[in-house]
Every structure is written in structure tokens, then in C-alpha cells.
Image (tube, rainbow, N blue to C red):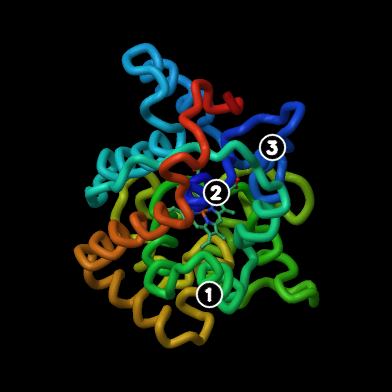
């Protein structure tokens, strides 16, 4: 979930300090975001070679593109020159990041609030072709999806049994399961094929296909059939997401240390 914040005018990288309440402790981010040490390492090398020139925001955008390419996904031209925010927003982080049990309507409206449309929503959700999620983020689907102690009936039967063995009704909250069970380390379109088969891990994944919104259903089918089209849209949507109110010119700063305001 780190990526979704890359374009915001508050910074998820800042630690708690006298004037900052870190976003790292927001509901969606706590015990979830990781890899800050890698950003620190990249920043330290850049500061050595060329002080205060490449912002932490650009480092994140470049790392997102680099990891996509290295895992087999598309490349794209990335607008650079973002500056770093001097603030964090715990409430912004709590209110603007979609929850894993979101309905399709929640997802559409939270993306819209950031200027992102249905294509951005479905294409960017394809980022879940990589990585894992903790049991606590999908437990509700397995045992009590709608408050009536019943599972989410859209989960495929055998997948449901597998997930229950990883994620028991009580405990096991930090056990993990791949978001794309077919190829969790390869950037490809199997994520969308799995959605057609009822094998999306999070509610927010599966509702792209089961949520009765024609546009997102069509897009899931299209991307499942045509990996090239998914790659093309993902690349464009990553640029759109990176352009959400970036700081430029004299706004913000280029930090020396990604965890601290200069
Ligand atoms: C559509 C709304 C989204 C929701 C509700 C969502 C939710 C989540 C959740 C709950 C996890 C697991 C976190 C954990 O267990 O700690 C996760 C992981 C992940 N998400 Fe998202 N996400 C969304 C959009 C995105 C987007 C747009 C991208 C990138 C383009 C993305 C990339 C990832 C990646 C790569 C992981 C795996 C991280 C890892 O293995 O450590 N997500 N997401």
C-alpha cells in the first residue's frame, strides 16, 4: 500500500518527531508498510553522490517503476522533479486509503476523490499481481462477511478451504497469503484471471468483478484476456497516480534524510 500515497502532498516517509505525527501509525499503514530501510539506503547513496537533488518522493516513484520492470511488467516515462512534503497527515491517511473490505462503490468514490477514474482503479489494483497480505486483512471474508457469521459466497470453494487453513477464525492475524496465488513474484495479468475464477484475495480485489458495476467487470475481463492492454493502462495510471497534487517549484523541500524534515 505504500504506492498509493506516492502522489499525495503529505509524506508517509516521515517518522514521529516534535512537529510530525507519522502516517506510519495510521490504521491502514501500521504493521503493514515496510521497506523504509531500502529507501534510506538509496537516499544515503544519492546524498553522497549529489546532495539534496533527488527527492524522497522521486525515489519512491522510481522504485515503483524499477520493481515493476524487474518483475516482468511494463516500463514508462516517469515525470520527475517532485519535492518532499514537510508534513504528514494521520487523518488523511486514515480517511483516504481504501480498506481491504471496501465495496466497489467505496473504491470508485475514494479513487475519484483523488482524480482517478474506473480505469485507474482496475488497472492499479493489478499491482496486486505482486506480494502478500496478512490474514487480518481478509479474515472477515472467511467467517463473517456481512455481520451474519457467513463467509463471502463469491470465494471459490477450494480456495476458501486453503485460505481458512492459513487464516483461522481466531489468531493467526499475521499469517500471510499471496495476493496473486498463481505467480506472486511475477508482474503479469494472472491477478485478473484469478478474479474471474473467484480467487481474488481481498474483498476489494474480488468486487472489481462481482460488484455489479459494468465498467469494472468489463475491464477485469479485458485485462484477463489481454496482458498488453493491462500493461499499457497500468503504466498510464501509475503516472496519473504520481501526479496527484505533487509539490514542485518552491513548495516543500528536497530532504537530506527521508525520515526527517530538514
Ligand atoms: C484499490 C485499493 C487498494 C486496497 C484496498 C489495497 C489493500 C492492500 C492490502 C490490505 C494489502 C496487504 C497489506 C498487509 O497485509 O499488510 C496490500 C498489499 C499490497 N498492495 Fe494494495 N491495495 C490497494 C491498491 C494498491 C495499488 C494501487 C497498488 C500499486 C499499484 C498496490 C500494491 C500493493 C502491493 C505490491 C502489496 C503487497 C505488499 C507486500 O507484499 O508487502 N495496492 N494492499
Task: Identify which residue is drawn at 55% across, 49% down.
Answer: 9
The local secondary structure at tag 2 comes to loop
Q: CA distance from mark 3 to mark 2?
A: 14 Å
Residue 260 position, x and y percent, is 60, 25
Q: In this picture, is 201 found above or below 58?
A: below
Q: Earlier in the sequence, mark 2 or mark 1?
A: 2
Q: Residue furthest front?
A: 250
User: What x and y, as percent, mark residue 47?
Assistant: 40, 17
In this figure, which residue is indicated by the disc labeled 1? 108
Total count of labels = 3
Tag 2–tag 1 contact (CB < 8 Å): no
CA neighbours of label 1 inside 10 A, class few (<14), some (14 to 19), many (20+): many
Q: CA distance from mark 2 to mark 1?
A: 21 Å
- Residue 52 against residue 21 in the figure, above or below: above
In the displayed orientation, state which residue is furthest to the top. 48
Image quarter in which the C terminus is found:
top right
- Residue at image position (43%, 87%) is 214
N-terminal-most mark, 3 or 2: 2
- Of 92 and 122, the residue lying toward us: 92
Mark 1 residue CB less than 8 A from any atom of ligand 1: no
The correct choice, above or below, for 46 with respect to 175 in the image is above
Mark 2, mark 1: which one is toward the viewer? 2
Disc 2 target residue: 9
- Secondary structure state at the residue bearing disc 3: loop
Give the labeled residue for mark 3.
22
Mark earlier in primary sequence (3, 1) = 3
Amino acid at each position: 500500500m505504500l504506492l498509493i500515497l506516492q502522489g499525495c502532498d503529505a509524506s508517509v516517509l516521515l517518522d514521529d518527531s516534535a512537529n510530525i505525527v507519522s502516517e506510519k501509525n495510521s490504521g491502514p499503514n501500521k504493521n503493514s508498510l515496510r521497506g523504509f530501510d531500502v529507501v534510506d539506503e538509496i537516499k544515503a547513496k544519492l546524498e553522497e553522490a549529489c546532495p539534496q537533488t533527488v527527492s524522497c518522493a522521486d525515489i519512491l516513484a522510481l522504485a515503483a517503476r524499477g520493481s515493476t520492470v524487474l518483475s516482468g511488467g511494463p516500463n514508462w516515462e516517469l515525470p520527475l522533479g517532485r519535492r518532499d512534503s514537510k508534513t504528514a497527515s494521520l487523518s488523511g491517511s486514515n480517511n483516504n486509503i481504501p480498506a481491504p473490505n471496501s465495496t466497489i462503490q467505496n473504491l470508485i468514490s475514494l479513487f475519484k476523490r483523488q482524480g482517478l477514474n474506473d480505469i485507474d482503479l482496475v488497472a492499479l489494483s493489478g499491482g496486486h499481481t505482486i506480494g502478500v497480505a496478512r490474514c487480518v486483512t481478509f479474515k472477515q471474508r472467511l467467517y463473517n462477511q456481512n455481520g451474519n457469521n457467513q463467509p463471502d459466497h463469491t470465494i471459490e470453494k477450494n480456495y476458501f478451504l486453503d485460505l481458512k487453513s492459513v487464516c483461522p477464525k481466531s489468531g493467526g492475524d499475521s499469517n500471510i497469503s499471496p495476493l496473486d496465488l498463481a505467480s506472486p513474484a511475477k508482474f503479469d495479468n494472472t491477478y485478473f484471471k484469478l478474479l474471474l475464477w473467484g480467487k481474488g484475495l481481498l474483498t476489494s480485489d474480488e468486487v472489481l468483478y462481482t460488484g455489479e458495476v459494468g465498467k469494472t467487470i468489463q475491464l477485469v475481463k479485458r485485462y484477463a484476456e489481454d496482458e498488453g492492454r493491462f500493461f499499457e493502462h497500468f503504466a498510464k495510471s501509475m503516472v496519473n497516480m504520481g501526479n496527484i497534487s505533487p509539490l514542485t517549484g518552491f513548495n516543500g523541500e528536497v530532504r537530506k534524510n527521508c525520515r526527517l524534515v530538514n
